[in-house]
Image (cartoon, rainbow, N blue to C red):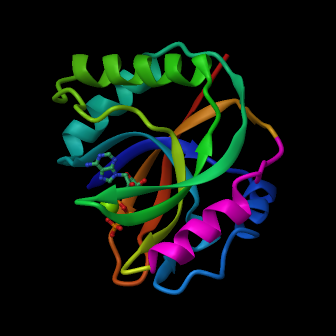
């Protein structure tokens, strides 16, 4: 199964984020139900590995915290914008949780994640969006702020890749103290 660790978002927050949808030709908008914040991508693992990773995550002692989402931005590949996202504000508690998850999963045998942690919620995949449209979209929405989120658990998701949109299923929730 294909797995990742992330934060699930409450319905109200998804609704707030959904207000950012629209006005960008060439954007493939993520269905609001699918909004999430990825803490650690795991990828394909056989079922027995999934169980070991679950045990490692369950043993981790993390603390709850408040998360604020603000501003929009893009990721680019080879100079081309490929995704549009809402950012998470700098948050030492989030970084701390991310570090604990990384350590736990590495101890359980996963290779280290090489990418820098850039917490975000993907709103859309972009294909040939005219640069000037992107610039004006980002300018128009840069002051976006969502109501602060009380994070009381993190989630192990499975992901079924689909033609239109992937289907994410929360498999296990891990409470934060
Ligand atoms: P698709 O790949 O079809 O667009 P998706 O990206 O929504 O679907 P997954 O590829 O299963 O679904 O990814 C699940 C989550 O993990 C997403 O938030 C994705 O951005 C993130 N992710 C995927 N691959 C990586 C990776 N190599 N490194 C870090 N995060 C990743
Ligand atoms: Mg993907």
Q: Residue at x 34, y 23 (%)?
A: 102
Please indicate whether residue 34 sits to the left or right of residue 107 in the image: right
Quadrant holding the C terminus: top right
Residue furthest to the bottom in view is: 25
Identify whether 83 is placed above or below 98. Answer: below
Identify whether 4 is placed above or below 89. Answer: below
Q: Main SS of the magenta segment? A: helix
Find residue 88 and report its horizontal and vertical position in percent: 61, 39
Find residue 116 and report its horizontal and vertical position in percent: 34, 32
Which range is magenta?
130-147
Quadrant holding the N terminus: bottom left
Q: Residue at x 76, y 51 (%)?
A: 143
* Viewer-closest of 140 and 56: 140
Find residue 96 and report its horizontal and vertical position in percent: 51, 16
* Viewer-closest of 58 and 114: 114
Q: Residue at x 37, y 66 (%)?
A: 82
Q: Residue at x 44, y 79 (%)?
A: 129
Ligand 2 found in image quarter:
bottom left
Asked whether residue 71 is drawn in magenta, I would say no
Please indicate whether residue 76 sits to the left or right of residue 69 in the image: left
Q: Is residue 65 visible?
A: yes
* Viewer-closest of 113 and 168: 113
């Amino acid at each position: 199964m294909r797995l990742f660790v992330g934060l699930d978002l409450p319905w109200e927050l998804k609704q707030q984020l959904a207000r950012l949808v629209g006005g960008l030709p060439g954007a493939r908008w993520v269905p609001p139900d699918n909004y999430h914040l990825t803490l650690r991508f795991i990828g394909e693992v056989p079922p027995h590995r999934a169980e070991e990773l679950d045990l490692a995550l369950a043993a981790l002692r993390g603390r709850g915290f408040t998360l604020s989402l603000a501003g929009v931005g893009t990721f680019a590949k080879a100079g081309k914008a490929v995704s549009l996202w809402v950012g998470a504000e700098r948050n030492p508690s989030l970084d701390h949780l991310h570090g604990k998850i990384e350590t736990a999963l590495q101890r359980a045998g996963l290779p280290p994640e090489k990418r820098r942690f850039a917490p975000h919620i993907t709103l859309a995949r972009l294909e040939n969006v005219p640069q000037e449209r992107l610039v004006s979209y980002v300018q128009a929405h840069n002051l976006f702020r969502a109501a602060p989120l009380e994070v009381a658990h993190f989630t192990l998701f499975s992901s079924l890749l689909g033609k239109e949109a992937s289907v994410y299923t929360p498999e296990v929730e891990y409470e934060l103290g």
